[in-house]
Amino acid sequence: MNLIDPNESASEEIQADPTTQVKLRSILLLLALAGLLTPCGLCWYSTRVQSIEQALIPSLLGVVVLIYTIYILHQREQKQDLAPPLWQVILILAILAAIVTLAIIWMVAATGWHKISGPIILSLGAWSFFLAGRRVWESWSFSHLSIEEENDLAQVKMVSIDGGHPIHPQLVYRYAEKYRSQIANFRIRNKTPEIIQAISEGKLQVKVKYLPENPRIHRFLGWKILP
C-alpha cells in the first residue's frame, strides 16, 4: 500500500499536471468564445425579432446555466467530487429556480410569450433543475450512506500553476487506504509551518467522509493538531 510519507520534504514542488492544464485551458477557451459570440448573436437576433428583450433574457439565463454546467462538469472531470453539504445544494437549487422564474416573469411582462424565446428559457431552466436536483439527491444519499474516517496520512505540498509563481501550499491527504486528494485555503496557508511540524511529529489528524462504493465522492471535514 503506497502511503504518503509524512517525513518527505515539504518544500518539494509539484509540477503542473499537463492533462489538467489542457482541460482548464479548454474550459477558458470555451468561455472566451461564448463571451465573443453572445453579443454577436444578441445583435443579430434582436434585429430579427425587433425586441432586445427576446434575445437579452435567454442570453443572460444561458450565461448563468453555462457557468453552473461547466462547474459541475469540471468537478467530475477532475474525478474529485467534494460532496457539498445538503444545505448548499438546496440553496443553489433555490437560487436557480428564482433566476428562471424571474426570467419568465420578465419575458412575459416585456414582450409576452414567444415561440422561440419561451422554449429556450424553459429548456435552460429544465437543464439547470436537472443538474441541481441531481446534486441534491447525491448530497442526501451521501449524508445517509457515507462513513467517516480519521487518519494522520497527510502531507504539505507546494504547488504552482503552470510551473510558475506564486507557489501555494496544499494539504494532501489519503483516505480509504488508496484515494488521494488535496485542499488549499487561507487557514492552511497561514498555518503551514505549524502543520509541517505536526506532520513531522505525527500529530496532524485529518477527518474525511466518503462513500464506500465510490470513495472518489468524499467530503473533507477538517484537520487538527493533536496535543
Image (cartoon, rainbow, N blue to C red):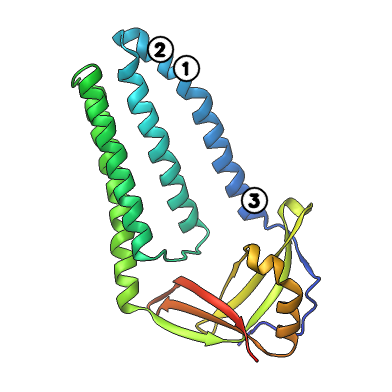
Q: Which mark is residue 40?
A: 1
What residue type is disc 1 on? Cys
Question: Within 10 angstroms of label 1, few (less than 14), some, or many (20 or more) residues?
Answer: few
What residue type is disc 3 on? Gln
What residue type is disc 2 on? Trp
In contact (CB < 8 Å): disc 3 and disc 2: no
The number of numbered discs placed on residues in the rendered structure image is 3
Q: Which residue is mark 3?
A: 21
Which element type, helix, strand or loop, lies under badge 2?
Answer: helix
Q: In the image, what residue occupies the spot 58% across and 78% down?
A: 223
Q: In the image, what residue occupies the spot 77% across and 54% down?
A: 166
Mark closer to the chain start, 3 or 2: 3
Q: Which residue is mark 2?
A: 44
Residue 8 in sight in this render: yes
Quadrant containing the N terminus is bottom right
Q: Is residue 104 left or right of residue 39?
A: left
Residue 6 in sight in this render: no
Q: Nearer the viewer, residue 23 or 47?
A: 47
Which element type, helix, strand or loop, lies under badge 3?
Answer: helix
Quadrant containing the C terminus is bottom right
Label 3 to label 1, Cα distance in Å?
A: 29 Å
Image position of 127 with respect to 48: above or below: below
Image position of 26 with respect to 193: above or below: above
